[in-house]
Amino acid sequence: MAEEQPFDLLAVAQAFVHKGYQASVFAAAEEAVHYLQSQIQGVSVGFGDSATLQKLALYEALSANNQVIDPQHPKTGQDFFTVAKQCLLTQVFITSVNAASVTGELVNLDGTGNRVAGSLFGHEKVYFVLGRNKLTGSLDQAVWRTRNVAAPQNAKRLGLKTPCAVTGKCSDCNSPDRICNGLMIYLRCMQDIKMEVVLIDQDLGY
Ligand code: SF4
């Protein structure tokens, strides 16, 4: 299934606003990082596993003015599950998505569930930070991208023992390392929680 590019990010942002999200658009990653630094100050911040956030060095950018917790960061110094649970109790939660539709839906695939769990409930605000490469023309294409592009690339990035980490293609494996366990489609902004979609006009993450 071919992916359509490029999309009008301002129009995409409007689609998310229509579904109850706040939305912001930035031409470059540096601008988005500065924006997030200005918006997030003096709070606890939990991270959901994300190559995009790593690429932005967001942990370092936010740590000066916040208590930031990232289960994947080398400075964390504790085991993944302990830190991932702490991330569920922070004031702010930041993650990315595996795909987003220009019609205003987000899609995430999760192996352990911490990323999806943290993105749904319990925080004052959730940010979804994503590059233009995550955008697709429809929800069906977003789900397809998640299973056939994002998951194999993330399996390879994480050094997992899955067929897709070698072949680059999903074979719906039964591997103990399988990361495709829970598929979350965010149809609209959840009730009683602020959620912002931060769109960046660069390719970021997988
Ligand atoms: S189901 Fe298995 S082979 Fe397919 S993308 Fe997920 S981890 Fe890779």
Image (tube, helix red, strand yellow):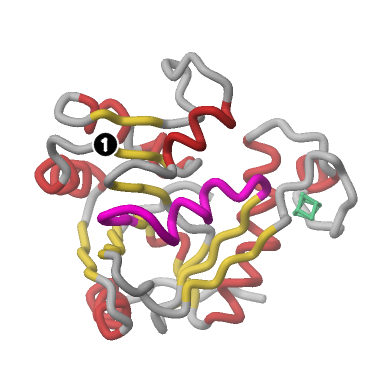
Q: Is residue 94 above or below residue 45?
A: below
Spot occupied by residue 87 in the image (x, y as percentages of width and height): 42, 39
Answer left or right for 183 relative to 95: right
Task: Name the amino acid type tagged 1.
Answer: Ser
The residue nearer to you, when weighing 196 against 56, is: 196
Q: Is residue 80 magenta?
A: no
- Tag 1 secondary structure: strand
Q: Quadrant of residue 27?
A: bottom left
Q: Residue at x 62, y 72 (%)?
A: 143
- Label 1: how many residues lie within 10 Å, few (<14), some (14-19) or many (20+)? some
The residue nearer to you, when weighing 176 against 193, is: 193
Answer left or right for 119 relative to 159: left
Spot occupied by residue 163 in the image (x, y as percentages of width and height): 85, 45
Highlighted range, magenta: 111-127
Q: Is residue 114 magenta?
A: yes
Q: Quadrant of residue 104?
A: bottom left
Answer left or right for 5 relative to 27: right
Q: Residue at x 54, y 72 (%)?
A: 185
Spot occupied by residue 49 in the image (x, y as percentages of width and height): 50, 41
The residue nearer to you, when weighing 195 against 139, is: 195
The residue nearer to you, when weighing 141 against 183, is: 183
Q: Residue at x 49, y 29 (%)?
A: 83
Spot occupied by residue 155 in the image (x, y as percentages of width and height): 69, 42
Please give the residue where the numbered disc 1 appears in the rendered image: 44
Answer left or right for 152 relative to 128: right
Q: Quadrant of residue 38?
A: top left
Q: Residue at x 59, y 77 (%)?
A: 141
Report the residue that reaches farthest toward the left.
Answer: 38
